[in-house]
Image (tube, helix red, strand yellow):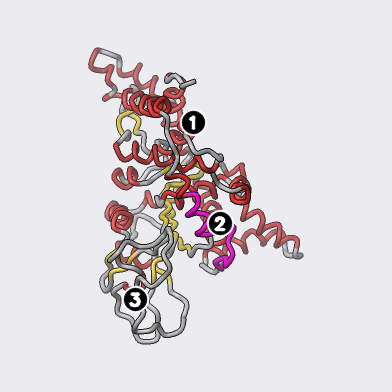
Amino acid sequence: MADDILLSKVHGLSDLELAGLLCLVSREHCLISTPPEALDELTEELQLIFTKTFGLKCVVVDCHAHTTLDDFAAAILTSKPQSRTPSPFQTRNSAEPSYFGARPGALTPLTSLSATSPGHPPPAMANVILARNLDQAPKAVQIQALELLRTRRIFTRTAVQAAPKQFLFVAALGAQSGGRAHVTPHLNDFLYLAHWHDPDLGFANLDEGFEATVGDGGSETGSMESVVKKSVNGDLRVEDDPLLSDVDIAALARLSQGVQIDVDVLRYQMNLISFLRMHRAVGGGVSPTATKHFEQLIKALAPLHQLDYATPGLVALALRKVYLHRIQIVEPGQERSMQWGSELEAVEALLEDIGPEEVMEEVLDMVATPL
């Protein structure tokens, strides 16, 4: 089990920080949404989280209907700081091994194929990519994002850029509820988990920056704006001594791999999946990839609760995060009872106020919890 110092750090995290931690532990990617009017604040908060809490370089990609493939590829790259001239004898596998080590023979940022002038380090992909309004980008751009996540590299006109060893892609979307935040289907299914942040809960790091600015005698009127402008311009400094280091994340990852799932809990998990598939309001989204992510998230959650086994409560929590963005509500005309003569108006009234959140809660109520 995790030591008390690490657990005390984890228990002090916000909901957004926990979402990022779970993705880093599992080496997967996520979708985070909030009401459209709070999307800018969400993006700023995520930037602060990944630079301060995790010590990772972060970039924001602003997507819109006219975003091109070249725009997307250029936006995810960041200039590496000038350093001493690399030795010609340096090998790409010379770094010390770690949990985030690259596979043998895989491309690394050091070996990216790019045309750069001598003395200028080539651009490298950021550790964390925040794709704001990715759902508004053309389908081709979203498919390119999927290819990046699958292969961990991206082709530009002049280079092949490889993702860094520690890499996270976050789709930041504006939506009135978590169940309404989606991207293109295949990319949607590839994303590990989804989280909807209620702006009423606040933004811990932004609020801290605001209070610090006011406390230093700054103007209350412009202090929040100054914090936002600083992060949008990419001036955030990566924390040298972050709250959660690579070692902490690697420790949690090792613990998650040793989590045991009892047969009764496994049966409960599979029953939930079956009931989701058979729910009359569900038109799709309960995929094999989702099942894999479901089990993966259950195991990632257990060490955070100082457990080495899965419980029904962890299963229910994982269900709400894994299927929030995946469940597709069926069109009234395609609802299965229409085959046996149901009135379309009655079906429309039945499905009017049902979303993924309501479906999951109904299924959790229907399936018996193991004692």
Mark 3 Cα within 10 Å, few/some/many (few <14, many 20+)? few
Which of the 4 image quadrants contains residue 221? bottom right
Residue 113 in percent (x, y) is at: 28, 74
The residue type indicated by label 1 comes to: Thr
Residue nearer the viewer, 112 or 199:
112
Span colored in magenta: 237-252
Q: Which residue is mark 1?
A: 311
Q: Residue at x 41, y 64 (%)?
A: 97
Quadrant placement of the N terminus: top right
For label 2, the SS is loop
Instruction: Estimate the spatial distance between the alpha carbons at disc 1 and disc 2, rounded to whole Å.
Output: 26 Å
- Mark closer to the chain start, 1 or 2: 2
Please tell me the numbered disc located at residue 91.
Answer: 3
Residue mark closest to the camera, 1 vs 2: 1
**Residue 52 located within the stretch drawn in magenta:** no
For label 3, the SS is loop
The residue type indicated by label 2 comes to: Leu
